[in-house]
Amino acid sequence: MVQVPNHPTGKLPPSQHEFADIIHRLEAGGSMLPDTPENLMQIIGIYKAYAVPMDFYWRDLLYIAEQVFLQPLPFFKYFLPQEYLQRHNHYAGDDAELRVWRGEATAHPELLAFIQKGETMKMPKLLHHLFHDRINMEFAEACMRAMLWHRGMGGKFDPYLDTEEYKANAHQAIKAYFQSNPLMLGLYNLFPDMFIEQCRQMSYYANLGLFWEVMAPVFFEMSDLYDEGKITTVPEAMNFLVNGIFAVANRPIYHHVYIRGECYEIVPKSKGFVWLYEAALPYVEAVFYRTAPFRGTKSYNAQAGQVPTQQKDFHYGILYADVFPVGTAGIPPTLLMQDMLHFLPEYLVDYYNSYCRGEEDMLIQLGISFQRSMYNVTSAVIQALRTALCHPLDDPDPEHLQANRQFFESQLNRFTRPEYNMRDAARLRDVQRQDYR
């Protein structure tokens, strides 16, 4: 277990950073999110509401990566077969590699009930799909595309996708997949790079699916511990995430495709790519911080200059989002918000009913809670990186404590960049206020 002190050591002078109070809180082992019962209730409730659709996301992402693969017209890629609903999560159930959640390894009961009935009634899957009464997998794909677009976020997985070895593995799988389709094989021979790029996208489907397979049981277990009175503060919730990050850090990241019963290892497990560096950190960078402007809110015309020219200047993730569903920077993940709405714990529904300006406002309140919860997740990532790269928080050496402070200040500098006005300097200031609703 990663242990953190309850109080700062007091061996350094106060920070002069714009967010000095938050720096001092991080140095004391806390989160960027203030430790209040209301904040704790919101973030745990959101983790639970997020985990249920996430249980679908990871299963369907792996189904698409492993089975649908390069299907030219994948009409039924969101129709998850029973095999994948019954697929055992590696971090839940009695046969888990590492049992993070004490619940079942197969699809969550609330998810199965929603797949059957949705918001309407029990009907064939196709009708649920056409009425859009289903889990919004488009959100999961948007996250995957953000990771694919914001390549080069560290690790060895992404560079491997450009190697000759990867191309050779992809070539074997593509030829096998289109073995009885001369038209597609002909197109592949004419435009091989196009097919290889689609294969890279499938590899990112697998990457994100394997990432979320870990996060779903982590969030389920946090919800259960909160219900049992065993998580009582925001730092305890953050530390559970920190410990979880280190516990599963070396989980393999790979991409296997199954074609007519044969497994093709496009990204083999033997490459040694691991969860923390190849999935978790790139996900936080690409999705929490960067993503991209929602189409229709900014011009993608290069001459208009409304979209940054440098990758480092993208700041459209949930940490910066204006959670009102309007055309402003940082469009919130409204599809995810709609998914989470179906699985909110009763205590969170009661809380929203106390503050909402009607039912339509509940999505906005839910989005704000989601933003708070992701600041806590980001705090866990920052504390985990500090543990790996710097020094213990209770280190007696002032030089080591100063190195920790410089690390924390560099992380929070990402929320104070000069090109942002006061409204766009992330939402770090906002989440410090309990009345941010």
Image (cartoon, rainbow, N blue to C red):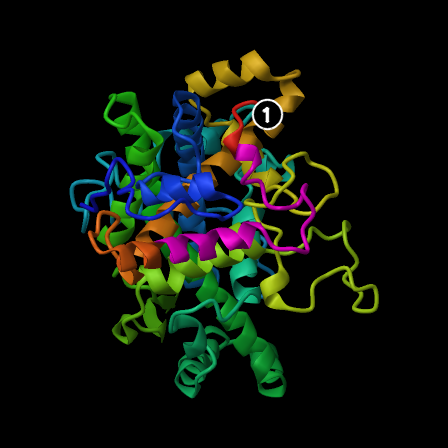
> The magenta stretch spans which residues?
405-431
- Looking at the picture, how far across and down is residue 281, in whole percent? 41, 59
| Quadrant containing the C terminus in the rendered view | top right
User: Helix, strand, or loop for circle 1?
Assistant: loop
409 inside magenta stretch: yes
Image height check: is 37 above or below 264? Answer: above
Q: Quadrant of residue 279?
A: bottom left
Could you tell me which residue is drawn at 53 percent across and 65 percent down?
148
Image height check: is 236 above or below 208? Answer: above
From the viewer's side, name the closer residue of 174 and 269.
269
User: Dot 1 surroundings within 10 Å: few (below 14), some, or many (20 or more)?
Assistant: some
Could you tell me which residue is drawn at 79 percent across and 68 percent down?
302
| Quadrant containing the N terminus in the rendered view | top left
From the viewer's side, name the closer residue of 305 and 292.
305
- Looking at the picture, how far across and down is residue 319, in whole percent? 54, 45
From the viewer's side, name the closer residue of 376 and 277.
376
- Looking at the picture, how far across and down is residue 27, in whole percent? 33, 45
Image height check: is 67 above or below 316? Answer: below
- Is residue 71 shown to the viewer in this render? no
Q: Quadrant of residue 121?
A: top right
From the viewer's side, name the closer residue of 206 and 434.
434
408 inside magenta stretch: yes
Name the residue that disc number 1 marks: 437
Question: As shown in the figure, which amino acid type bears the numbered disc 1?
Answer: Arg
Q: How many marks?
A: 1
- Looking at the picture, how far across and down is residue 325, in whole percent? 69, 36
Q: Is residue 76 left or right of residue 329?
A: left
**Extreme-right residue of the structure:** 303
